[in-house]
Amino acid sequence: MRMRPTLSWTPGEDLPPGTTDLRPVADALSAGGVLVLSGAGLSTESGIPDYRGEGGSLSRHTPMTYQDFTASAQARRRYWARSHLGWRTFGRALPNAGHRAVAAFGRHGLLSGVITQNVDGLHQASGSEGVVELHGGLDRVVCLSCGTYSPRRELARRLQEANEGFQPVAAGVNPDGDADLTDEQVGGFRVVPCANCGGVLKPDVVFFGEAVPPPRVEHCRELVRDAASLLVLGSSLTVMSGLRFVRQAVQAGKPVLIVNRDPTRGDQHALTRVALPLGAALTTVAGRLGIPVDGRTATS
């Protein structure tokens, strides 16, 4: 789950319009020292839906909050039933052209770092190194009692053994890996405890209503301070957890560039917003810079 407090925000008419001109993005990457900040829009081409883009799941899905998860055994049962089913979709997802282009930029020394708001691990799967997972990762779980971390695949195996025959059909899967199931479909799903102490297990992600760990935030702020520019990919910047880094960059006089098909909360701060699909846009930029993607030289 990629879980922070939601904010009420509607793109205003005074925001600068998007463009299809990729030259500023190519110029920034050519100069090097680019810090990437990615959001859910980068993973939609891998089959993982967005929250706020066209057809975004917030219109039909209320994500689990930290307060509900920790206070209610029934809420945890509902979460783990839905997440157990949704995890299969995440497990099948593969990096798309956008992830592969970011990895290629990194291999060629053009990036100073990558911060992602996503919990899907697709940056790492594409070969990017040193990725900061701002909101954690769905590939691991943590015990709220003893603090033990364990692989999600181990929990998936235990949940499967405890719930043989659990095969409901979900209405959809959300960016946090939470499948849309009714209370009737959840039924008597059995939640398993921590294998170490019997405590409550939670995905190692930041829920809505939960704060990003301060040391992680400070690390990201250091990356912004060290970067020459900030490139935002596929994030609406609706929540402050990502927007604060845009504001920090602007205050430091560093250019901010955004590639996102829809308007974002950071458009007013950006040098440009390119309104193009992420995979095609970043592959085109790689081609203009003569950078191979997946062993091939992309073409513009």
Image (cartoon, rainbow, N blue to C red):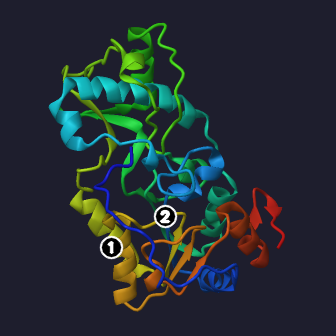
Give the residue at x 23% y 50%: 210
Name the residue nearer the viewer: 85 or 101: 85
Check disc 2 and give the amino acid type: Ser
The quadrant of the image that shows the C terminus is: bottom right
Tag on residue 244? 1
Residue 101 versus residue 81: which sits nearer the camera? 81
| Residue at 70% from the left image edge and 57% from the top image edge | 97
Of the 4 image quadrants, the one containing the N terminus is: top left
Q: Residue at x 41, y 28 (%)?
A: 82
Q: Dot 2 surroundings within 10 Å: few (below 14), some, or many (20 or more)? A: many
Q: Position of residue 86 (x, y in %)?
A: 49, 31
* Picture disc at residue 14: none
Percent of width and height locating residue 132: 41, 59
Q: Dividing the picture into quarters, in which one does residue 194 lie? A: top left
Name above or below for residue 289 compared with residue 68.
below
For marks 1 and 2, the one nearer the N-term is 2
The residue pinned by badge 2 equals 235
Residue 264 placed where, x, y %? Answer: 48, 71
Q: Secondary structure at mark 1?
A: helix
Q: Name the residue furthest front.
A: 13
